[in-house]
């Protein structure tokens, strides 16, 4: 394998790992706020690493630039979406789970 | 000491979407207070017309201010419905330069003392400086000077800000240039065809959105400086994001799920829309913290672990955002933790 292929494999593996973490977190964490943590952060890094792999496989050129722009938009939109969801939950008056009420996570 | 039922009111006015509402509230308040005290109700509407460097000449601004005051006075008379109430209007600070909330507070307090007014009623959208939220600090200053302060209730039906604002030609061209540049970037060539279609598209975008998308005047030099500092900020943020993810991955995959979630609130020391947005998004992207709600610069944040809370209050991110938008000097403001300790002391 060439160094570029190795880089691509590492990036894709990392992306897949964090995407899986996001999915596991979505299932395991106790409430909407905690779940939003998992979807906003791990999901962002997963997508970023995968797109990084795409950019690496293209090499330097206009396509890479476009992928970088995609990355930029992911950084802007992912937290905003997580914020919108939790804000809606907050405005509906959903109390965050704190673990001291004896309810199951 | 000011009595609770002070019937002499000071109401600062400026063009504002909720002004009509505030006038009605002030008149109601004055009449009911006067009824309790058996004193005549008095309302002074004042317009602090500061000297300002502007393209419009100052006499036309003074005329606009007088027209507004006349309109306010007629609204107030209408609301009073013949009740016994004295309404006065005044232009103040016509030859002073006002720039900070303190300046405005000084002017208002001086006027209140001259005319023996004990209660200041503020319009919830009173913001004569523009672009920076002025009201909280202004209210605090006026209160410190011994006046009672009230804020008229917000009218929920009013939209918070008009979507379409007055635009300037600079804004138009800035938007045109940005759209054109972006189009050419995506096209990846500068062939005549791309140039022509790009110019047409950018033209349509700029015509349709120039009064919507850029909310503040464009200052090219400042924008370039900010962009440069922002480029320094990005690697720092990326590093924080990687740390955040390793931490979250550890927590999520740990068999015991070691979390200790809690909602925390604090007032960020950043002052306008874009910095607050940047800070809120950065907080969401970094270790165990998620911005739930933002009102002006008051942030409500959901934190997943105790260490995330400590990091948040240490204020590293906040400092970095201040560095991006206001330069190095502003980065040295105390952290949220230190501010809170000061408040407690």
Image (cartoon, grey):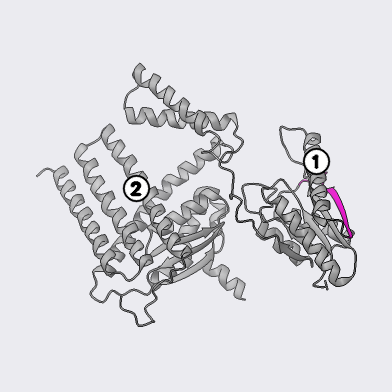
**Residue B96: percent from the left, percent from the top?**
80, 46
Disc 1 packing (10 Å; few <14; some 14–19; many ≥20): few
**Residue B36: percent from the left, percent from the top?**
84, 72
User: Can residue B7 be seen in this snapshot?
Assistant: yes
Q: Nearer the viewer, residue B314 or A28?
A: A28
Q: Is residue B154 left or right of residue B298?
A: right
Q: Are marks 1 and 2 on the same chain?
A: no
- Is residue B94 inside the magenta stretch? yes
Eyeballing the image, is B179 above or below B235? Answer: above
Q: Nearer the viewer, residue A55 or A1?
A: A55
User: Can residue B327 be seen in this snapshot?
Assistant: no
- According to the picture, the residue beneath numbered tag 1 turns out to be B67
- Is residue B48 inside the magenta stretch? no
Eyeballing the image, is B297 above or below B263? Answer: above
- According to the picture, the residue beneath numbered tag 2 turns out to be A74
**Residue B293: percent from the left, percent from the top?**
49, 60
Quadrant of the rendered image containing residue A18: bottom left
Mark 1, secondary structure of its residue: helix
Quadrant of the rendered image containing residue A73: top left
Quadrant location, the N terminus of chain B: bottom right
**Residue B33: percent from the left, percent from the top?**
82, 68
Q: Distance between the residues labelled 1 and 2?
A: 49 Å
Q: Give the residues drawn in magenta, as a range.
A: B84-97
């Amino acid at each position: 394998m060439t160094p570029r292929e190795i880089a691509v494999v590492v990036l894709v593996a990392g992306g897949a790992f964090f995407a899986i973490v996001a999915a596991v977190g979505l299932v395991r964490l106790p409430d909407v706020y905690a779940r939003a943590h998992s979807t906003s952060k791990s999901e962002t890094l997963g997508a970023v690493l995968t797109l990084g792999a795409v950019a690496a496989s293209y090499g330097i050129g206009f396509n890479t630039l476009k992928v970088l722009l995609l990355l930029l938009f992911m950084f802007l939109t992912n937290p905003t979406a997580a914020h919108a969801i939790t804000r809606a939950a907050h405005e509906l008056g959903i109390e965050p789970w704190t673990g001291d009420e004896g309810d199951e996570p | 000491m000011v009595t609770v039922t002070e019937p002499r009111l000071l109401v600062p006015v400026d063009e504002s979407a909720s002004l009509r509402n505030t006038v009605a509230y002030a008149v109601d308040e004055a009449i009911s207070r006067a009824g309790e005290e058996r004193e005549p109700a008095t309302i002074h509407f004042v317009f602090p017309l500061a000297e300002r460097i502007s393209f419009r000449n100052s006499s036309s601004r003074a005329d606009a201010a007088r027209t507004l005051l006349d309109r306010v006075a007629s609204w107030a008379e209408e609301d009073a419905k013949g009740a016994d109430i004295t309404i006065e209007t005044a232009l103040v600070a016509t030859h002073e330069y006002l720039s900070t909330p303190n300046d405005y507070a000084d002017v208002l307090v001086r006027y209140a003392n001259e005319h023996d007014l004990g209660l200041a009623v503020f319009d919830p959208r009173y913001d004569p400086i523009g672009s920076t939220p002025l009201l909280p600090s202004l209210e605090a200053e006026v209160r410190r000077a011994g006046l009672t302060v009230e804020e008229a209730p917000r009218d929920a039906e009013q939209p918070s800000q008009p979507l379409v604002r007055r635009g300037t030609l600079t804004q138009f061209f800035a938007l045109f240039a940005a759209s054109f540049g972006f189009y050419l970037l995506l096209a990846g060539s500068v062939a005549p065809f791309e140039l022509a279609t790009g110019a047409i598209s950018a033209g349509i975008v700029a015509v349709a959105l120039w009064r919507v998308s850029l909310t503040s005047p464009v200052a090219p030099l400042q924008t370039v400086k900010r962009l440069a500092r922002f480029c320094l900020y990005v690697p720092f943020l990326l590093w924080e994001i990687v740390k955040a993810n390793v931490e979250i991955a550890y927590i999520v995959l740990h068999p015991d799920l070691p979390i200790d979630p809690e909602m925390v609130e604090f007032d960020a020391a950043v002052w306008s829309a874009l910095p607050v947005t940047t800070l809120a998004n950065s907080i969401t992207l970094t270790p165990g913290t998620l911005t739930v709600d933002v009102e002006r610069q008051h942030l409500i944040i959901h934190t997943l672990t105790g260490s995330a809370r400590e990091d948040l209050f240490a204020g590293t991110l906040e400092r970095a955002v201040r560095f991006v938008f206001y330069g190095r000097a502003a980065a040295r403001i105390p952290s949220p933790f230190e501010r809170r300790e000061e408040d407690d002391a």
